[in-house]
Amino acid sequence: MPSEPNSTGPTSPDSALRVLIGVCTLNEADNIVPLVTRLRLAIPEADVLVIDDESSDNTAELVTQMVEKDPSVMIIVRHDARGLGSAIRHAMTYAIDHGYGYFLNLDGDLSHDPEQLPSLLERAKQSPPVDVVIGSRYVSGGSIVGWPIHRKLMSRMVNLFATSFLRLPVKDCSGSMRCYRVDALARVGMPTLHSNGYAVLEELLVRLHRHDSQMAEVPITFTDRREGKSKLTLREAIRSTSQMLAMALRH
């Protein structure tokens, strides 16, 4: 199984309009095939890049089968790295290095509806330019389906902390369904990001805000995963909060 896609990447006529969708996976065999299939239908012009942390189930093998049939689907299996933060940075670095215009990402467990991604891309392309569009659970029209009350409270507390201490001008700082302009990501500098895990989502917003990047939110419906096990635990939430506190002290 190849651990890197073709070094030149898929091409399209106008690199400024090229779209890459990044999906980070760890043991998502139950979800990855329907997710990638729906992504290809939602934004047919986009390439899909799966960053897999050497899943112990057959996630990578299932994606590889899709790669063989569809050149717009790619996979990178990381044998010496772990974690959502570094996986997102890896996918973003690929988008920068391969000349994409827009980078979208979402969770790999079907908690984000792929059919809602086009609304983020459409908002990013409007004038004046928007550097990051967040699929938001906490603006009018956004919602969460299937979460128990303790998960909702944990998410609300993380977002309240982020908006209060990091002074971010958005309501949903921890959601990972986003659309970025790749040139804005290039200005951030992927190697200089400090956070691991979910806190990288807030650090990206902090860095973009510091570079006067324009931000917008569009409402989405977040649905709790039906298959597999969530990677967001209380321990991870506490670690993310501590990393955000470190960010506040640095900035």
Image (cartoon, helix red, strand yellow):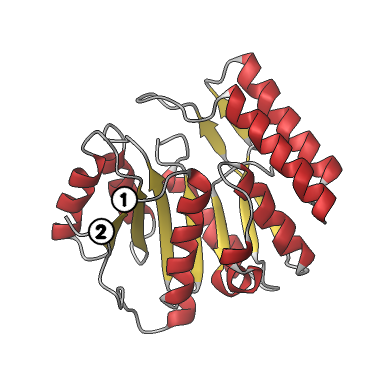
Q: Earlier in the sequence, mark 1 or mark 2?
A: 2
Q: CA distance from mark 1 to mark 2?
A: 8 Å
Residue 57 lies in what quarter of the image? Answer: top left
Residue lying at the far bottom of the rendered structure: 13
Q: Is residue 119 above or below residue 109?
A: below
Expressed as whole percent of the image width and height from the top left, the position of residue 159 reads 73, 37
Determine whether, in the image, residue 64 is placed left or right of residue 238.
Answer: left
Q: Nearer the viewer, mark 1 or mark 2?
A: 1
The tag on residue 3 is 2
Q: Residue at x 46, y 34 (%)?
A: 111
Determine whether, in the image, residue 169 is placed left or right of residue 150.
Answer: right
What secondary structure is found at the residue carrying circle 1? loop
Instruction: Name the residue nearer the viewer: 70 or 92.
Output: 92
Expressed as whole percent of the image width and height from the top left, the position of residue 174 reads 64, 41
Crowd rating for badge 1 (residues with CA inside 10 Å; few <14, some 14–19, many 20+): few
Q: Is residue 29 above or below residue 177?
A: above
Q: Residue at x 31, y 48 (%)?
A: 36
Q: Residue at x 84, y 43 (%)?
A: 165
The quarter of the image holding the C terminus is: bottom right
| Residues tagged 1 and 2 counted as in contact (Cβ below 8 A) | yes
Residue 10 shows up from this direction: yes
Q: Give the residue number, with chain letter if any, for mark 1.
A: 79
Q: Amino acid at mark 2?
A: Ser
The quarter of the image holding the N terminus is: bottom left
